[in-house]
Image (spheres, rainbow, N blue to C red):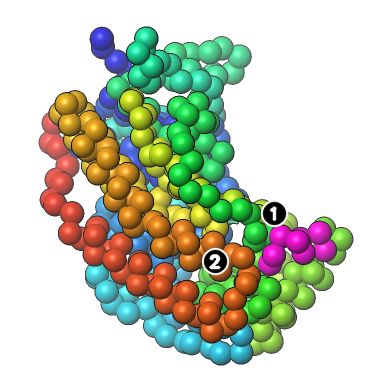
Amino acid sequence: MSFDYDVIVVGGRVAGASTAMLLAQHGHRVLIVERSSMPSDTVSTHAILRTGVLQLTRWGVIDRLIDAGTPPVRDITLGFGDERIEFQVRNEHGIDTFYGPRRYILDAVLFDAAREAGSDVQVQTAMKDLLRQRNGRVQGIQVMNGRSTDVITARYVIGADGYHSRVADLAGSAIRRSHPATNAINYAYYEEIDAPGFWFQFTPDVNTGLIPTNNSQCLVFAGRPVELRERFSADPDGEFMRLIEQGGVDLAERVRPGKRVGRFHGTNGLAGFIRQAWGPGWVLVGDAGYTKDPISAHGISDALRDAELCARAVDKALRNPEEEAKALDWYETLRDGLSGRLFEESEALARFEWSPEEASARMRVISDEVRAECETLFSLPDWAPALVRA
Ligand SMILES: Cc1cc2nc3c(=O)[nH]c(=O)nc-3n(C[C@H](O)[C@H](O)[C@H](O)COP(=O)(O)OP(=O)(O)OC[C@H]3O[C@@H](n4cnc5c(N)ncnc54)[C@H](O)[C@@H]3O)c2cc1C
């Protein structure tokens, strides 16, 4: 059978665009199908920590974020109750700077890079269903284009369609681990805040902080146990400032002179899961296959990490179909091995059942896991882009 594409990637943000870019660079015929328009925003704060910056640097796209005016972040404040730990980003794995780009910039940079690598793209196009062969193997998708339904075939469909992944549901991907939604988050953008860098504050019953971002603005966020979320709708500005003050008087002093730009965004809590990563003809990457509470600010970084692991595995399976199971099991095992502790520690922090000392210990574990993650990425064998199509 001949296929329209080697790979269809459903979802074109951090996970999908990166996976598509890497596969196209390695000579495969790739289509991205994205429901929204690009560039566009999405509900997410956007601190990118070491693993994510490492990937963006290795792929040669970090300069595009810098050119878009994304401020470099070298100073980090971690607050645990009344204790403050202030430090500069250590130079490890060649990375000494973090970034907090707006998602409409980050996602568009990766989307453009995927297109430049040769991916075809269809935006404002929603995947509706999976196509299957008689034996059940996935072999493409149905999409809604305005009022008409089109059929597009491919050897693999990659679900990079986020938290509510339709690809995962239709494929029947099993949920292997899960955690409940416990952390309700709100955030807004402010002008005229003097932010020293990233500030992540853990005070009993509240997680607050600052993420300097594009347009000389600063994202201010506040998370608290879901049971307390109702208070927000009655008096958003008042309740937001109360949460910031509860986090710390010094943080509140930084935020108070700020002028809010635009509305509050947020979530009423995000349940976490780790799903089966692949089956015949389909693979999941990013939040579609593995979502954890955002309190560890690591979803984007993990999506960028797994985009490469996923693309390497699919590249192998496309070149050697008899090695499909070996290649995709490698991806799933590595993803799960690197994600387990991050998942557990994020869940534990998001439950708000810690003392400041315990929160500090959990953040140290996360930091060790990130180091291991970077080392794993560095130890991967060379994988040079193809000069000709596979
Ligand atoms: C409140 C909040 C704060 C966060 N803060 C941080 C942070 O500070 N740092 C961090 O690293 N992470 C953070 N995260 C996590 C981060 O946002 C996610 O991990 C990341 O967006 C995952 O990227 P993704 O590409 O897998 O999915 P997404 O970014 O969700 O992209 C999925 C894409 O798929 C498209 N799509 C969905 N269904 C279809 C369909 N049927 N057809 C076609 N397209 C479809 C969607 O339109 C979307 O563009 C936060 C998340 C939240 C909710």
Q: How many marks?
A: 2
| Residue 68 to residue 316: above or below | below
Please name the residue shown 37% across and 9% down the image: 134
Query: Which secondary structure is most common in the magenta stretch?
Result: helix
Say what secondary structure mark 1 lies in.
loop
Q: CA distance from mark 1 to mark 2?
A: 17 Å
Residue beneath disc 2? 348
Instruction: Pick whichever of labels 1 and 2 is earlier in the sequence.
Output: 1
On screen, residue 367 versus residue 185, left or right, reads left
Image-based side of 41 in relation to 69, left or right = right
User: Which amino acid is tagged 1?
Assistant: Asn
Task: Say which residue appears at 79% left-offset and 69% top-offset.
Answer: 239
Query: Looking at the image, is 343 positioned above or below residue 259?
Result: above
Quarter of image, res 90? bottom left
From the Cβ of disc 1, is ligand 1 less than 8 Å away? no
Label 1 neighbour load within 10 Å: few <14, some 14-19, many 20+: some
**Magenta stretch, residue numbers:** 224-231
Q: Which mark is residue 268?
A: 1
Quadrant into which the C terminus falls: top left
